[in-house]
Image (cartoon, rainbow, N blue to C red):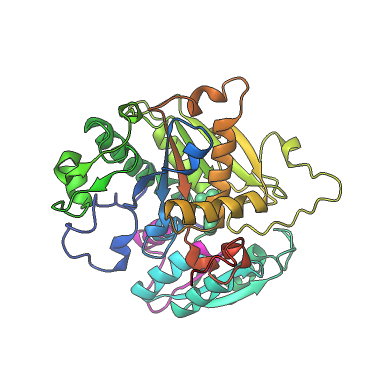
Amino acid sequence: MSSTTPASSSFPAAKRSHAGAGILPNALGAVGNTPLIRLNRIPQSHGIKCNVLVKCEYFNAGGSVKDRIALAMLTDAESRGLLTPGKSVIVEPTSGNTGVGLALACAIKGYRCIIVLPEKMSAEKVTTLKALGAEVVRTPTEAAWDDPRSNIMVARRLARETPDAHILDQYNNPHNPLAHRVTAQEIIDDVVATAASGGAVDKGAAVLTPDASPPHRAMRVEEGVSRLNIVDTSPADTTPSGLVDVLVAGVGTGGTISGIAKRLREQDHNPDLFVLGVDPVGSTLAMPASLNELSEGESSAYKIEGIGYDFDPASLDKNQVSHWLKTRDEESFDYARRLIRQEGLLCGGSSGSAVAGAMRFLQQGGEGWDRFGSQAGKNVVVVLPDSLRNYITKPWLLEGNEGEAHA
Ligand code: PMP
């Protein structure tokens, strides 16, 4: 990898809206500016009083949070003259979503793209990658990261063997966490705009009146929420403060959690931000390391895709994480199904992990733990990284739904 450490991301800040922003030059213009949506049923079912807001990254053009870093890393390499369209070959080891983001950008910009991903990752991701014209190489899931058969090592070998190949290297590229300054800024802007307007948009079950305009994002941000004719049916004490109090994210490369947390903690927002890192049982990322010990008979294999590693990537700044929680597949899938079924959020499995961690954190007693969940007006932001599109054929998606068909 050949990135230098820049003072700031060379990826331009996302425009504050898509619709209403004029014609976008290509699909990459629809990366970023994702919606922040309030949960209305899941936290309430646990007696949680604070606002739980989800950053819906599956609205990105390629369907995940990783579109942002793919574009940022590619743009940086281009700006440093490292890539030539029609000649350079992008090779990247990934759990799939960075691959889709890169394949999308490569399709538009005219680069050959080789994505190396473990067998565990879904057939849907492979189909999307191939549809975008990427070449896909699969590697054994059980290979440790430094095993010559791992996706990281195979990508390195392919890059050595392929003329004009370039690994952007999400595990070490500073533009991975840096791209999320923009994600954080979007969150700040939305929380501040809603607080300034008295919380009209996200107080409970908002209903559009018949003469209301559609909830047009440009209007919401630039002209104020009151113009939307939204009838608010929830109690007044849910008005959000203008601050993000807690950030919750599942951790893979760590770029998402590190980059968003760093920006939210800056002096002009909230230096006291509490950051909860969610790590699957079987991964070794969590701190203290004793959290990662397996119980007797427990396997280190987990099905959730995109989070957890057996090494600490440089893109993860553990100093940004206040507290870690371990999650299991079953609770992650359960919360993913609830997000879809009860909140209408078409997210993937790791979104369920993040919300499972958030719910446990906000409910548990103990020193400091209950200072958020019990307080109306506090804002807890949870990142939902990808979409159910990646898991359409996975049995977990419809578990428990059998026999519910209506005649
Ligand atoms: N969830 C999914 C589905 C992902 O693909 C990723 C990226 N590996 C993450 C969560 C974690 O994001 P990050 O790599 O920024 O920690």
What residue is at 55 percent from the left and 66 percent from the top? 391
- Front residue of this view, candidates 311 and 200: 200
Q: Is residue 90 above or below residue 350?
A: below
Residue 284 in view in this figure:
yes
What residue is at 17 percent from the left and 39 percent from the top? 226
- Front residue of this view, candidates 84 and 328: 328
- Asked if residue 307 lies left or right of residue 243, the reply is right
Q: Is residue 10 above or below residue 245?
A: below
Q: Where is residue 294 drawn, in percent x and y?
A: 79, 45
Q: Is residue 97 above or below residue 37?
A: below
Q: Where is residue 261 drawn, in percent x and y?
A: 46, 37
Q: Where is residue 373 drawn, in percent x and y?
A: 50, 29
Q: Where is residue 123 drawn, in percent x and y?
A: 58, 74
What residue is at 20 percent from the left and 45 percent from the top? 220
- In magenta segment, residue 179: no
- Asked if residue 285 lies left or right of residue 240, the reply is right
Rendered image quadrant of residue 21 = bottom left
- Front residue of this view, candidates 320 and 41: 41
- In magenta segment, residue 96: yes
- Asked if residue 111 lies left or right of residue 221, the reply is right
User: In the image, which residues are magenta?
Assistant: 72-98
What residue is at 32 percent from the left and 40 percent from the top? 202
